[in-house]
Image (cartoon, rainbow, N blue to C red):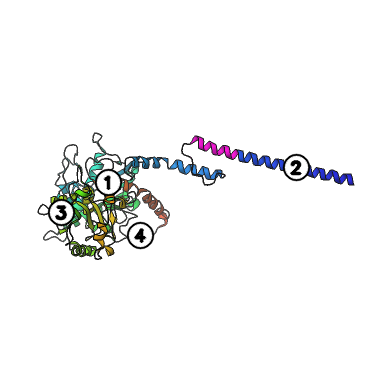
Amino acid sequence: MASLGIITRKLLFSLLTIASILFFLSWFFVLRSTSIDTSLFSNTNTNPLPVVNNGNFEARIRNRAILNDSVEEEEAELSQKEDGVKCNTKNTAILKVYMYDLAPEFHFELLDWKAQGGSVWPDITKNIPQYPGGLNLQHSIEYWLTLDLLASEIPNIPRASSVIRVHNSSEADLIFVPFFASLSYNKFSKKTPHKKKGNDRVLQDKLVDYVTNQELWKQSQGKDHFIVAHHPNSLLSARMKLWRTTFILSDFGRYPPNIANVDKDVIAPYKHVIKPYVNDTSDFDTRPTLLYFQGAIYRKDGGFARQELFYLLKDEKDVHFTFGSVQRNGINKATQGMHASKFCLNIAGDTPSSNRLFDAIVSHCVPVIISDEIELPYEDVLDYSEFCIFVRTSDAVKEHYLINLIRSIKKDEWTRKRDRLKEVEDFFKFQYPSKEGDAVQMIWQAVARKVPAMRLKIHKSKRFSHTTTKKEQGLKSIPSPRNFW
């Protein structure tokens, strides 16, 4: 019995020893394999992965997938930063747009162009109808977008390539309704004697009747359509019936949120009216005017701040704050004034926005924005705080607040903002043919960023479409503040 106990103890000791050896060997191989795995990643990739846990293989694979998915985006951003422009304007895809062949009365006929031979569109290789000047130009956005779509079909016109026109609607990302709504309002908003409706209202009614009877509209209820209504009063009647469509607007000042909102619609810049500052060699010391404003002083709605600021600033030295208009050489005077000023006031008027901001940008005059409800073009990709100063209205109208703030901004800070203005000014320039990174291309890219949300809404709306009753269809025609679509 004693000898049997000794043998049992020796056997247990041997088993324990073997188990310990195997345990240490297994840890050795695990550590070794982990080390080899890490070295493989670091040796085959010049940009090591941001691994949170070196021992978690699955986490590293996920990180690698995320990294690879974003390589093109990061390279595009780096390329833009090397050029001194932080806003990523590189085209990752071409937007395909189907444009209705609306009758000329809705677009170029408003520019006194006469259709010939049954043609709907002018031959822009021979003659481009000119848009009227003055303040009409500030809302001419639909004109530039339509020209760009027409030019996309002509191979010998040098232009940027954010968008192309397609004639097969099944290939299109979006459907464009080419109504020159702002021009129609400017020309025909007043009622004609002995007529119940002005010509602008007549055109809007005809537009609604045409569009809503199109099969493409019926398929999506307009969710994949877009239309430009840049003048705040344009499309005043039709907007209530076309509310599902994407609007391209100057702001939301005269729209209820269930008709237009930042999630659904696109804010586009005004066409600047004053002349850009070409070959600008001025600096902080050679611009004699500290703060500049010239325009209508007494406004309604949100524009009360203008008159308050007028009385606060009118006696300040090196501040120009006067009434002005386009009449009596007003545009040339504003051009000279902005080019000679360090800061330019952009104060809310009848609506939150005005072309004054974009005049300031092309003048390299640092904008001072006093408009609490303002929405800005392409702000999802552009940081306005880099070249603008924002002041709450409640603060701006306090005695001495605004002038003390402006005087506290020194030469170095002003110069940084002015330099950034020079970098971004092309984003706000309209031209034909359009060029890479100009206002036309930036608007197309902003529209393209709305496409995924449009598709999501369209797909979700089809879930129960086969069971929808006529009564429910009638209720869906009424926009709800809780459902902007």
Q: Quadrant of residue 232?
A: bottom left
- In magenta stretch: residue 131: no
Q: Farthest residue in the left direction?
A: 328
Camera-side mark, 3 or 4: 3
The front one of 203 and 442 is 442
Circle 1 packing at 10 Å, graded few (<14), some (14-19), many (20+), is some
Please tell me which residue is depicted at 27% across the width and 46% down the height of the picture: 419
Instruction: Tell me which amino acid carries mark 4.
Output: Lys
Question: Real-space Cα distance between discs 4 and 1?
Answer: 50 Å
Choose the circle earlier in sequence order: 4 or 1: 1
Camera-side mark, 2 or 3: 2
Residue 463, visible in the rendered structure: yes
Image position, residue 301 (x, y; %):
23, 64
The front one of 382 and 223 is 382
Residue denoted by label 2: 17
Residue denoted by label 3: 187
Q: Range of the magenta residues?
A: 33-55
Relative to 245, is 21 on the left or the right?
Answer: right
Instruction: Tell me which amino acid carries mark 3.
Output: Lys
- Helix, strand or loop at label 2? It is helix
Q: Reply above or below: 279 against 247.
A: above
Instruction: Tell me which amino acid carries mark 1.
Output: Asp
Question: Real-space Cα distance between discs 3 and 4?
Answer: 34 Å
- Helix, strand or loop at label 4? It is helix
Choose the circle earlier in sequence order: 2 or 1: 2
Residue denoted by label 4: 476
Choose the circle earlier in sequence order: 3 or 1: 3
Residue denoted by label 1: 419
Camera-side mark, 3 or 1: 1
Choose the circle earlier in sequence order: 3 or 4: 3
